[in-house]
Amino acid sequence: MVQTSTAPLPSSARPYVGTGQRRIDGVSKVTGQARYAAEFPADGLLYGHVVSGGALASGEILRIDTRAAEAVAGVVRVYTHENRPRQPWFDSTYQDQVAPPGIPFRPLKDAKIVYSGQPVALVVAQSLEVAAYAASLLEITYREEPFRTDLAAEQSNAYVPPEKRAGIEPPPPDRGDVDRALAEAPVKVEASYFVAAEHHNPMETHASTVVWNDGKLTVYDKIQGVVASKEYLNEVFGLSPDDVHVISPFVGGAFGVGLRPQYQLFLATMAALDLRRSVRVTLTRDQMFTLTYRPHTIQHLALGAERDGRLTAIRHEAVAATSTFEDYQEVVVNWSGLGYRCPNVAFDYKLAKLHTYTPSDMRAPGAATGVYGLECAMDELAHAAGIDPLELRLKNYAEEDANTGKPFTSKQLRECYRQGAERFGWSRRSPRPRSMRDGRELIGWGLATGFWEASMQQTSARAVLSADGGLELATATADIGTGTYTILAQIAADAMGVPIEQVDVKIGDSSLPASPLEGGSWTAASAGSAVQKACFGLREQLFHHARAMEGSPLANEVLERIIFTGGRMEVANDPSRSVVVADVMAALGLEKLAAEETAKPDQDAQENYSGYTHSAIFVEVRVDEELNVVRVTRIVDAVAAGRILNLKTARSQILGGVVFGIGMALEEQSELDHRFGRFMNHNIAEYHIPVNADVRDIDVIFVEEHDDKVSPIGVKGLGEIGIVGTAAAIANAIFHATGKRVRDLPITPDKLLRDDVDGVSSGMARAG
Amino acid sequence: MNRFSYVRPDAVAAAVRERASDPGARFIAGGTNLLDLMKYDVEAPSRLIDITRLPLRDIQEIDGGLRIGALVPNSDLAYDPRIEERYPLLASAILAGASPQLRNMATTGGNLLQRTRCVYFYDTATPCNKRTPGSGCSAIGGINRQHAILGASEHCIATNPSDMGVALAALRANVRVAGPDGERTIPFSEFHRLPGDEPQRDNNLAADELILSVDLPAEHFAANYTYLKLRERLSYAFALVSVAAALRLEDGKIAEARLALGGVAHKPWRDEEAEELLRGQPAERASFEQAALRILSGARGFGENDFKIELARRAIVRALEQAAAGTPQSQSDKRVQ
Amino acid sequence: MQATETDTRSGNGTGEPSRIPVVLTINGTERRLEVEPWTTLLDLLRERLDLTGSKKGCDHGQCGACTVLVDDRRVNACLTLAVMLDGASVTTVEGLAQDGQLHPVQDAFVEHDAFQCGYCTPGQICSAVGLLKEGRAQSDDEIRELMSGNLCRCGAYVNIVAAVRQVMDGTGAGR
């Protein structure tokens, strides 16, 4: 058996891996045939509309008058905390798969208000319109208690989370003597940076269709992993595993908001079980702002260096928002100990409790935030030291992971810098801010480095070969737009030597072999390795059968010398000795041949190596000198991410991450009104995400990187790396263009203008 | 969305009668704002009077100008050859607003009636004097980066979100309306209201009046004009500040000037004194600076939106420069000329 | 105008919902339907006709995911009342492919990987078909501006422009 193959994928006549392949689910998406969670029909389906709580973030519900709603024809039931069926969860402390320490929010459990806009009732009716109309008729009175949602004001109450969140490394131990190194450093910079709260806002809002069939549930859920929803339903409602089947073939974007089962799943299931009917609950766009968010975070960075730019000290401190009931944590400051070689490093990461919903992972959680701070500070240091920002990074290049003392599984970051700089034309950059212009537009060039952890998770997959040559892959994982369907088909087609058209991929179904949540950029490495391993299992079975056949041309051969290609097994370097796979199946009278395997990360590699994806991103901005209109006109992102499976979908992932970064840098902020404890711009007209006109040329380079340790198939993952560093590169480019250092994201026109008027480069103008 | 009844009259008189008979009724045409607000329970009409089949879809010549039927969709208007040639300022302003889909739906009359984008107006859980008179203005002391710097009151600091309206203000259009007692014409500058102590009233249209047309006067400023819109992303966003500027130049001097601002007040903001100040002046930056100072002399910020005063000053100067140079802002090339 | 004031009057706002007959041609097929006055075209398509290709991303005209063609013009189905469309012709993403052949815009979207999660995609494609019919976009800047009514959170804009450009060049429209 091949465990962790260091060899390239087995050859076939036309390898699919490494080429640009059209998505195998593409036609279903462009024709409207792909169905998402709210689009599965059911007989007698009822519609639930969630009633969101009022403009207060703490207190209790005194009274809910549901009479008017119940009087509307077509309303079946109005659920509130007063009449909802009691659930096992209300007496347990069950936490979903990625829940941070604390007690998850339990909808309708009691009268308590713990955040503004929390669900306070569910109206179930015979149609979507009736449910929404009746929901508007509820009259609710509250008793308000004091609440706090101002992060800047809560900084003084920040604390080190007493319990670590599983899977999240707390800051490593400090090293060296940062105070002294900073005091002695001939060049130093110190600044505060602010990252605004952001909401994920996938285009599909959260929805669950719960089909009730004689006590058994088939649930179509918007989730980044059906196993998480199934486990949640079993635990929360005390259902037996056989009674719950979760299906999610297509997910209309998620970016992290689909990692935790969200409250619509609870509400729809509660109603379905109680009414013994099928129920669908779909959240409105505004209600998407009552789900998790990227926590706004205040960072303080101090960097010290020799005159030649060699780093001598880094201090990186952060205070991030969390809720009153959970300690959400992410890796924010650790990057400063990893990114560059530096003998003296100090870290501090604290949380501040706010009366909001619990934040959660949003595309490159922690890294998007922390690397933004680090990479802006590096730019400030380059400016202070009079050194080119690229040269500064090369001077401080980290050859090993100093946080752990381990070597990297691979690190082609130097090549990223070199190829990216060449493509971008970085050498033509004039170092002085405000020194490049075109008419009334100031031109700025900025860069940043990106880092993201490369990991894989244990994943199982099944491969089934049919007598007609069809190959079906099955694993419970998700495709949230990342291209999972297609890369799995490519890997399998190559492994079995069959055309990709013969490969069918089944995912997003809890009855399939177990898979973790799709997140952390680990799915390609994890599900890909599992699928390959399952195919190798098939190969082994086929080979043994073939070898055992009478007069077999493969007699006395070993599997390692067999190539699967064109539907045949042939001996390497001797294609005249071959067996047709279909003949083997026929001879044995097999309709189907199946293999199920589980791929796990290599323990040895995990213990002895540090795996990271790297990137170097170069940005050109043009800023109108007077009006401060910022245009991002050119981006080159050079990425080293191990093996690239599909050039088309891989590039799309990077493009998407970069566009997310443009939003983070220039547009996105969920704005809290502390009087109401409420995110007020709760729609996507006022919460700005990039539109087509915001995005121009983005050039993606995949730097060749061979990695035989990070995962069995040498893949590192691409879902997050595109956003990491992007906001910093844009902010740095704006500084280069204008000489204005806005350290408060997003960089909206008012902040650049304030700089003009006040004449100071402000830090956090407004942390709230 | 609340329950309502629906009627589809086929004559203006019948439509007006329907409206007069039911104070809770609303006309609907494009529906792009009304249905939006109904889904948020901000509007809850008892009856919708579908006016889309009324004969108000033509653009006609009148007295050297044009009469634009109230039901002419925004996109048809922007791309009408007569508008493109004679009133490019109007075409440009329309194309700066919303999205192609919304412009295909939204109508000329409806554009005049679109309501503010204030986040508190839209959120029925928060106080808002415009939505619920007497409940208070949450935007004062709240999130107000988008809000008014001119003509606001202690009761309301909301802005009118229209782009088209800014051009119509500059062009000194007239609004022709029909009511139970017949037709009347309202100068555009008098159509919308300042909030005062009745912020619930956006305009001076009587409850039972229907917009028939927007009439453009003959003077169209096709040579020297611009519509410059500044916002928080490069398209499909409401204005922080927008400027409609139009000049008639004679021998390098300004013979006639038109200047209106969007995103800064409860109505498209036009300042006749500023326009007058420009008349006879050389078409150069110093003159433009003077006009900008004049138009902003009464400006006041409410915290987050303080920056708009300076941003508006700069935008006005730039827009007048664009107009004078005959280099109007393109709405697809995002570089500011 | 066939409709008159009386034959479409319905409902009094308090009693039982009353349905209004409308005739719509949807993807080439004439449909005689009875709709409530508050039913949007989008909800009609998705919930009653099982045409779920048109997506609901915001329900307020902020995202464009619901874009369909009504009488060949691209509109937001979420802000269109079905009752007001009596007599109109509606084309959704399900109606673009002909005889099993993808519409050139659909094929270009697959070829250029102009989507990831696929949720905004039907709206993007209908919008692009509308844009091509309008013939107003020539340059890439104009494509970007005139496709800005369709948000894509996966950030596929570069590829969307490339896909639209390919079809535009292939059909001789534009540049």
Image: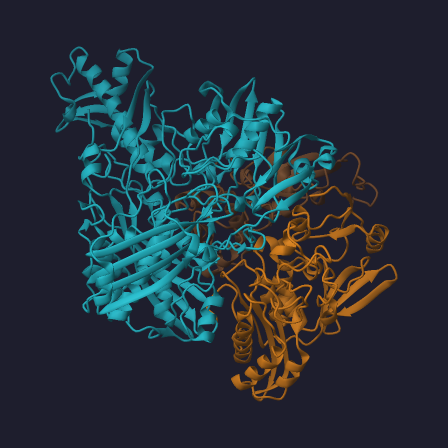
Decide: is A430 above or below B198. Answer: below
Q: At x 15% / y 26%, what residue is drawn?
A: A560
Q: Residue furthest right?
A: B181
Residue A407 on image: x %, y %: 17, 45
Q: Quadrant of the N terminus of chain A?
A: top left
Front residue of B82/A692: it is A692
Residue A40 appears in view: no
Specify whether A345 is left or right of A659.
left
In the figure, A276 relative to A113: above or below?
Answer: above
**Residue A673 placement, left or right of B134:** left
The chain whose colour is cyan is: A
The answer to which of A284 and B58 lies nearer the viewer is: A284
Q: Position of residue A194 (x, y in %)?
A: 41, 59
Q: In the figure, the orange chain has which letter?
A: B
In this rendering, position of residue A94 left or right of residue A1: right
On the question of residue C79 being in view, the answer is: yes
Give the percent coordinates (x, y) of residue A632: 40, 62
Which chain has been coloured brown in this picture? C
Query: Where residue A17 sits in the image (x, y, percent)?
Result: 27, 38
Query: Is A499 or B245 nearer to us in this picture?
Result: B245
Along the line of sight, the residue nearer the viewer: A48 or C98: A48
Q: Quadrant of residue B179?
A: bottom right
